[in-house]
Image (cartoon, rainbow, N blue to C red):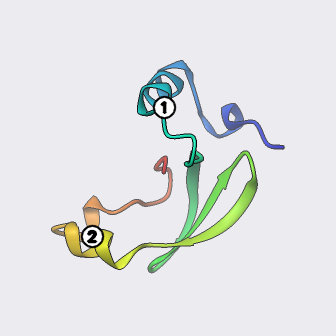
Amino acid sequence: MRELETLGWDERLDSHWTELARPDLRPARVVEQQRDLLIVDGRDGQRQERLSGGLRHECSDRTALPTVGDWV
């Protein structure tokens, strides 16, 4: 299992995550992007995630969407 700290996870992020209190979600960092496909890396290793249509629709422009380096 990969430790999030190797991806830049710190006490500040951990504090925000704890406040969110969503055990059904797992934090990960975007490490690659190919259009609407994101490669994210987290405790479970790397996986592919697609941006949802709802998220793309809600964002006023592409700069508001997750990109490489973002935590998701």
The mark total stands at: 2
Q: Which residue is painted at 21% across and 68% down in the image?
A: 58
For marks 1 and 2, the one nearer the N-term is 1
Q: Dot 2, crowdedness within 10 Å: few (<14), some or many (≥20)?
A: few
Task: Give residue 2's position: percent from left, percent from top.
Answer: 79, 42
Q: Amino acid at mark 2?
A: Arg
- Closest to the observer: 63 or 43? 43
Q: Secondary structure at mark 1?
A: helix
Q: Which residue is painted at 45% across and 80% down in the image?
A: 35
Task: Give residue 9's position: percent from left, percent from top.
Answer: 59, 32
Asked whether, in this view, residue 66 is left or right of residue 43, the answer is left
Q: Which residue is mark 1?
A: 17
Q: Is residue 17 above or below residue 45?
A: above
Q: Secondary structure at mark 2?
A: helix
Task: Give residue 41's position: percent from left, percent from top.
Answer: 66, 54
- Closest to the observer: 25 or 28? 25
Q: Which residue is painted at 27% across and 63% down in the image?
A: 63
